[in-house]
Image (cartoon, helix red, strand yellow):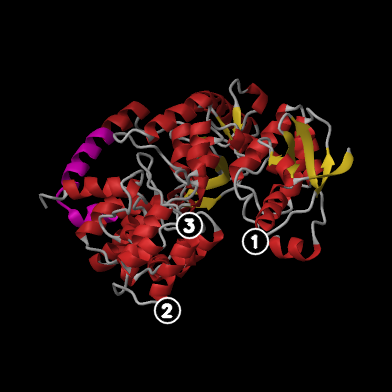
Amino acid sequence: MELIHLNLDQLHPAKLNARKKGGKEVGDLLPSIKSIGLLQPLLVRPNADGYEIVAGQRRYHALARLAQEGGAEPVPCIVMADNDDARAIEASLAENTARLPMEEIDQFKAFAALASNNVSVSDIAARFGVTERLVQQRLAIANIIDPILNAYRREEVRADTLRALTLATKRQQREWWKMLNDEEQYAPQGHQLKQWLFGGQQIPVANALFEEELYEGAAIADLFGEDRYFDNTETFWRLQNEAIAKLKEDYLADGWKEVEILDIGQHFANWDHRKASKEDGGRVYIRIAHDGEVSVHEGYITDREAKRRETGDKQPGDTAAKPELTQPMQRYLDAHRHAAVRLELLSSPGLVLRIATAQIIAGSRLWTVEAEDERTDGESAAASLAANPASQKFEEERQAIAELLGIDFKDGSICGGPAYQRPAVETVFARLVELDDEAVNRIFAFVVAETLPRTSFLTEALGQLLTTDMGKYWSPDDAFFELWRDKEAINAAVKQIAGKAAADANVAATAKVQKQIVRDCLDGKRKAKVENWLPDYMAFPMTGYTKRGGIDAIELGKAAKAALRSV
């Protein structure tokens, strides 16, 4: 390398530079360079057009802007060897990680470019002072197909959805992208996307009783979580069932007289059992969760057995008598009893309400409902949602519902969560039977609301039916203005709140300037044309400010409006 001085017209930014956006945001550099000059040389290398800037793009743009104000001194530059791509990318990335944050996609691509030059994950991590896991995460995201990455760059794909897609094959990514762009299909997002990728069932590797080497498929790592998942549930259950059968044999060989394997998803009702030693005829219960987790409950007898022992009907150590009915006979009787009971249930709306509520909360082996994911993208958006009075009141109601049921919901939500954390359906149902209809209806309304899917036909339809006024719960805040970036839409909003003259006068202004006009109108610093202004995005049905479309809630709102015309 050598240090030389070059004129600005000899320099141009390199296409290779890791930063693709943000390079012209130089307001923080101008005062320093103007007063004391350039302290750190640019990193460049020669090419057919002069010299391309490998590192120092923002310094170059700052110097170019100062040159417009009059005069430009030669720029100190360190010249790198030609055709040194890996080091060039490394130099660009090393500089940018310590300065203005690059756009995420550029970071992902930069790490991928280094990896393609045979730089190992550990070497990349060591050079830039980050963890290997962080490097692996970025490489995984860089492996997502370009149409999805570009949509994420345009903020059309959520961050949690992008992370979930790192678990997808290229074929699954293309299939999901096709669904996303098909108005007649639903493309799952976030947690639901994981369910779709794994065929509706996520089986963590940690839940396997068998050695992982026996599994012939692949274990897919979730680089943004702690778990890895089996890619084929059928293969998993075959091996898991074999391991469970072996576990039962081991207990029997160890002297336990009876080992009962519960149905998948069946809860072990420990309150209906009492502890009993192996010598006292205690049995082993093996519980299997829907996600494959196996838990063993050693040394229990039923409460009924214990009471018989206490009254002398059964002596300690006695073995269980042979069942009166065979399993096929029991299933036959159960089928007929079930048919009669469910018909009778149709005429008992009070019990229907309680059963539905209990199963929504605790789950069922036939269906399970999850609470909607309340997370948002970014700290400012999360803080905005937390400050929303509707969110705060809903959280207060959640705590009241938990107290009403007398149950400690460990994961924070009334509905959903891992199977082992859900309360038993027996517990919930028994509590609901004790409560009056008014209390049960209150609980039922909450669990239906907690499981209402975000960005859905139902949300948009309810907003229209209930004529929801967003002004009661929300006003434009910093997070809204931070996330709002479309100049055409913002200018239309300026026209709406400040008038046509203000919009026309600022049509060429930056989005920041135009948003400030809206803020000034809201703060009373500027006369507003409308009082209590809310953006059209907060109406039911939602409307936008441009004709470009691409907003899911608008399309769902149109569908809801059409469906509700006859109501």
Q: Specify start and end residues of the magenta stretch as a single range.
A: 334-354
| Left or right, residue 13 beside residue 490 | right
Q: Which residue is mark 3?
A: 483
Q: Nearer the viewer, mark 3 or mark 1?
A: 1
> Which of the 4 image quadrants contains residue 471?
bottom left
Judging depth in this view, the residue of 361 and 91 nearest the camera is: 91
Residue 81 on image: x %, y % = 84, 32
Point out the tag, 3 or 2, that comes first from the N-terminus: 3
- Image coordinates of residue 134 in percent, x first then y, are 69, 43
Q: Amino acid at mark 2?
A: Lys
Q: Give coordinates of residue 141: x percent, y percent.
A: 59, 37
Question: Residue 306: x, y in percent?
Answer: 48, 52
Tell me the CA gap for discs 3 and 2.
Answer: 23 Å
Type of the residue with mark 1: Gly
Q: Secondary structure at mark 2?
A: loop
Residue at left offset 76%, top offset 45%: 7
Q: Earlier in the sequence, mark 3 or mark 1?
A: 1
Q: Is residue 564 magenta?
A: no
Say which residue label 1 marks: 27
Residue named by callout 2: 525
Is the C-beta separation of discs 2 and 1 under 8 Å? no
SS majority, magenta: helix
What's the distance in space between the residues labelled 3 and 1, CA to CA? 21 Å
Quadrant containing the N terminus in the rendered view:
top right
- Is 336 included in the stretch rendered in magenta? yes
